[in-house]
Structures are given as C-alpha cells and as structure tokens.
Image: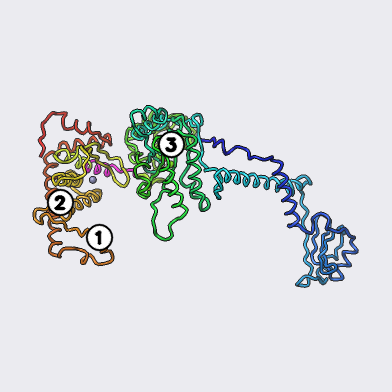
Amino acid sequence: MERSNPQNQTAPKGSPFTGILWGLLIVLLLNGLIFPSFSGGRIVETDYGTFISKVDSGLVRDVVIKNGEIYFTSSGAGDRTEAYRTGAIDDPGLVDRLLQAESPNPDGRIAFNRVVPRENSPLLNFFLMWVLPGLAFYLIWRQASRGIQARMREGGNFMSFGSSGAKIYADADVKTSFADVAGQDEAKETLREIVDFLHDPSRYAEIGASLPKGALLVGPPGTGKTLIARAVAGEARVPFFAISGSEFVQMFVGMGAAKVRDLFRQAGEKAPCIIFIDEIDAIGKRRDSAVGGNDEREQTLNQLLVEMDGFGANEGVIIIAATNRPDILDPALLRPGRFDRQVTVGYPDLKGREAILKVHAKGKPLGPDVDLNTIAKTTIGFTGADLENLLNEAALLAARRDKKAITMTEIEEAMIKVVAGTEKKSHKMTDKEKRLTAYHEAGHAVSAYYLEYNDPVHQVSIVPRGQMGGYTMYLPTEDKSYHSKNEMLDNLVSLLGGRVAEAIVIGDVSTGASNDIERATDIARKMVTKYGMSDRLGSISFESGHDEIFIGRSMAQAKPYSEQVAAQIDEEVKSIVDAAYERCEDILSRDQKHLIAVAEFLLAHETMSAEEFEAVFTDEAAGHDKI
Ligand code: ADP
Ligand code: MG
Ligand code: ZN
C-alpha cells in the first residue's frame, strides 16, 4: 500500500517561478531584519585608525571580529547607530583597549566578540544564505497555495486543506488477497459478499437486495483485521480509501470533521468504492455530555454519522471499519444504516492457527522435526500476529546459529520469547486451564442437549474470546421477542452446566464460572421481581419502574416493598437457582460419558460444530430421552 492518491501529487496551479521569486523576496527581507548591520549598503568602510579613535572617544557599541575583518557599530549624529567595517590588524593591545573604553551601551562597556572563521566554501555559504531559505519558502508557498485552492474548491471552508489524508489504492497497488488471510472464514465470507455486490450491483438491485452500508470488523489486536481489509482492497477492483481513526484527531480543531467531509466527497465521486477506517475507536468513542469531553473528536464523529446517513443504500460506497474495542464505540455508530454488520475476527482455532503458520512459514526452510500441526496445538490463544512473530523469532535464532533450517529447538525458544513478550495480550493456556475450560464448556453444551426449551448448540469452543476462556453458542430456533418461564428455567440449567461439570469431573470449581453464575442469578431475580413467575410471590412486579428518581436516596427508600418481601424475594431467587443446579447435576452425572466425550473432542480440536456435537450422541445410536 504505497501509492498515494494521485490527486495529492498534482502540481499547484501557477508557475513555480512565481514561488521562487516570492521566496527570494522574503529571504531578502528577513536577511535585512536579522543581520541589519551587515546588510548591503549600510556598512561604511573605514580604516583601522578611525576605528581606534572611535573606540577611544567612547562612541563604539558593538565589535565583531570575523573573517579577518572588524565590524563595529558606533553612535553617530543624532544618536543614530552607524555600522562600519575595517580590516583586522594584528593588534595585541586591542582587547585591553576595548575593555577599558567607554561606550554608549547601557552598561557603559563595548560588547565585543570574535567569530571563529568557518571553513565554508563561498558556494556553501551562498547555498545556506540564499538557496536553502529560498527553497524553504518556495515549499511553504506551494503548500499554502494548495490550501487556498482546496478551500476554494470546498466553498470557503477554512481549515480544510483539501486532502483527507486517505490513501486510494487501485487494484494493481495492493497485492494482498484473501489467500493471504488464513482461517477467519466467516469474516472472509461476509466481506466477499460485499465485494461481490460492488462488482455487480445491478444483480442485487434487480431482486431488491440493498447493499449493507457498513461492516465493522471486531476482534482483539493482531487477529488480522487490517490484513483482511487490505485483502478486500486487493480483491475489490474498485477504489479503496484507507485511513486510520487516529489520523482524524491528530490535527487542529475542526480538521477532523473537514477530513471526514472531504473523504466522503472523494468517495462519492469514485463510487462504487470502499472506505476503510482502521481503529475507528479513536474517533468513535462514546460521546458523553460530561464536561471535558473531547470536542474535536465528537465533531469528527458527528460528521462521520452525518456522512454515513447522507449516502443512499445503493450508491455503492461501502464503509468498512475495524476496532478491538467495540464496547467503547458510540451506540449511534452501530444503528441500522451505519455499521449494521458486525464481523467477528477472533482468536484463530486449531485449524486456523495451522493455516496461519503455513502462510508465514513460506520462504522459511523448516527442519524435518518441525510439524506445524504440533505447533498449532500448543499455541491456543495466539493471534495471527503472535504466530507470525513466533516463526520470525525462530528464523532469527536459526540465522544467528548459522543453521540452514529452523528446527524445533528454535521454535521452542522463540515460543518462550513470544509468550513472555505478549503476556498481557495473548492468553496462552496451560494444560490444566485447557482441561478445565473443556469440561466447563462441555458442561454447558451437554446439559443444553437434554433441555427441551433451550436453543440447540451451535458451536462449542475453548478458544478464548474476549474476556471469556471459551464459549458455547446456541442457535436461536426462532426470533423471540419474549421468553416463556420454561425457557428461562432451562436457560438457568445450561448456564450452570459449566460450574456443575467442573464440580463433577474435576472435583473443584473455578472462578471461570463467575459470569455464568451472575447471569443465572440475574435471570432468576428477574423471573421473581419483573415477570411475576414465582409461585410463592405471585404475578406481581416488584420493580419500581422509576429507578432514576431514586438516585441519591438510600436503597431502602428506593424499594417499593417491605424488608419482609425483600427477604422472600431473595429466598425465592435462591430456590430457583438451587433447583436449576440440581437438575443440571442430575443431567450431567447421568451422562458423564458424553460429557467426557465432548470435553475430549474439545481438547483435541478446540472447536466443535453443531454436527460434530450431535455426532457424539448419535454415533452409537443409543436413544437418549430428553430429561
Ligand atoms: P489487527 O489489525 O487485527 O490488529 P493485523 O491485520 O495488523 O491485525 O495483523 C498483524 C499481522 O499478523 C498481519 O500483517 C499478518 O502478517 C499476521 N496475521 C494476523 N492474522 C492473520 C491471518 N489470519 N492470516 C495470516 N496472517 C495473519
Ligand atoms: Mg489493525
Ligand atoms: Zn461458562
């Protein structure tokens, strides 16, 4: 991605000569200001005798001895200062004479010094004095005149320097393609669809499909978001504007918004095209009304929202953005019609890691003992960037040792380095943690399998995602706007599955389940206080519905019910959670066989699809009734 927007390279209108002339003029003026006594015409040539007599009569202010000449100033008629030059004569008494002489200077002394002659050639002097400043001024002039032109184009918008700083890449510029992105199939699939759409919008328009306006790539640092966007640029064969969020906010106040405007104007002219905003969190942070908010950033964000709304759905401008902090983004960015598609670019799973290693092992000779699959197995929690780094470090070590190929020794040493270096970033799991996670997730999944009202398992994984160690995803069978009591009870059971499995198989429980327990408690409490699903307390809502007016008062006052009822609520919540726990224990202790099978599968493959999960149960064709 080297070539910049050709527009940025167009020469400014107007002859360069005008610029050089202006530059010289300014140099002349400045030279006059900075070295007034030495500038042309005003220095009077005089003889050494006159100099001495002026010194002795106390008229001399400054003396500079330079290049075998004496430059001096003295008071002349009417208190004017006159500048003189005379030849320096080998005069050992001169310093004493100058020290003793009187002077019209405020401190009554002559200011004098000797400038050590420089060895500069006259040519260099000329260059430094004239050509260099002239050149500098020419460049400044060029920049400024470009700004003026841009402002005229923009219709008099000050601060806009005309260039959004976005780089445009045409098809030939970017060599990256989807083939360079290993794994991340889901992300690639989504983006391929978008690229397709841009190539043939009519096909989609004919059946009334509208182009998504924006896609947000979300994932931890180093997982390949920027890489994927670059691949889109390489494959799209439409203009691709790339800019990083931080570039919007570096500059002066008002610049960010102007840059956004300019970017979208350029994109509008080049449609169909793609705009890529990397690290959008730099401008997309949640706006808050609190004092001390960053006005500049908010202006920029507002402008971005305005511009995104300004495009019709099928105008062929697609905005792709990337972030590793979707949690801090302003909700307005995620509304329909803006970044309505989220594409997860997560930690790669086993297959993904092996594929990434293959990509980055290209051009690196590997010893016969190096097996990429084995490396992939031991690097759960590594990102693509970590894996690239790993192979690089190993190659460096091998080179340092004069080896012809990278061996397992180097890989292992590099591993230590990479893990230590990214301690905070990558969560390399120990075997014990891996086992715990595997059983935890298996517990969720297997309990869900037996629950009639729980959504079916879609994917189980022990690859970390965000803060979570692993995850179990369910596939909602229908779009639900409300939930039944049975559903909620079943959800409680599957939520507790992780904790229960840990207790049953490992005989100890971990903090990994704390979020599950929180969520379970929350559901149970809502069932009691909000949805009136408790048999004992009946169909009464114990929510005030006016939470906000109670802020600042004590909680006791805020509760619209008595202490007695509060105690009953707590009891009821506990009994619901306890009952769910028991049901879960019952399910998992009855079918430890499949719990173990799923966990072992996860330990071996890390990620399990719905089909693979179902296969565990159906392979031996034993009928399992729903409990
Ligand atoms: P992000 O933008 O998500 O922080 P980058 O795209 O900058 O991550 O990834 C950094 C580098 O890591 C990439 O340039 C690439 O060399 C390597 N990398 C990351 N993910 C992958 C991947 N899926 N396939 C191949 N290389 C990858
Ligand atoms: Mg990036
Ligand atoms: Zn869990």
User: Which residue is at a point 25% across and 50% down the rendered structure image?
Assistant: 515
Note whether residue 410 is visible. Answer: no
In the picture of the structure, the residue carrying the numbered disc 1 is 547
CA gap, disc 2 to disc 3? 50 Å
**Marks 2, 3: nearer the viewer:** 3
Mark 2, residue position: 577
The range drawn in magenta is: 427-440
Position of residue 475 in the picture relative to residue 228 (left or right): left
Q: Position of residue 425 (x, y in %)?
A: 38, 46
Contact check, label 2 and label 3, Cβ < 8 Å? no
* Mark 1 element type: helix
- Closest to the observer, 428 or 334: 334
User: Label 3: how many residues lie within 10 Å, few (<14), some (14-19) or many (20+)?
Assistant: many
The residue identified by callout 3 is: 317
Question: In the orientation shown, which residue stands out farthest toward the left?
Answer: 536
Q: Amino acid at mark 1?
A: Asp
Task: Indicate which label's residue lies in the foreground, 2 or 1.
Answer: 1
| Residue 435 lies in the magenta-colored region | yes
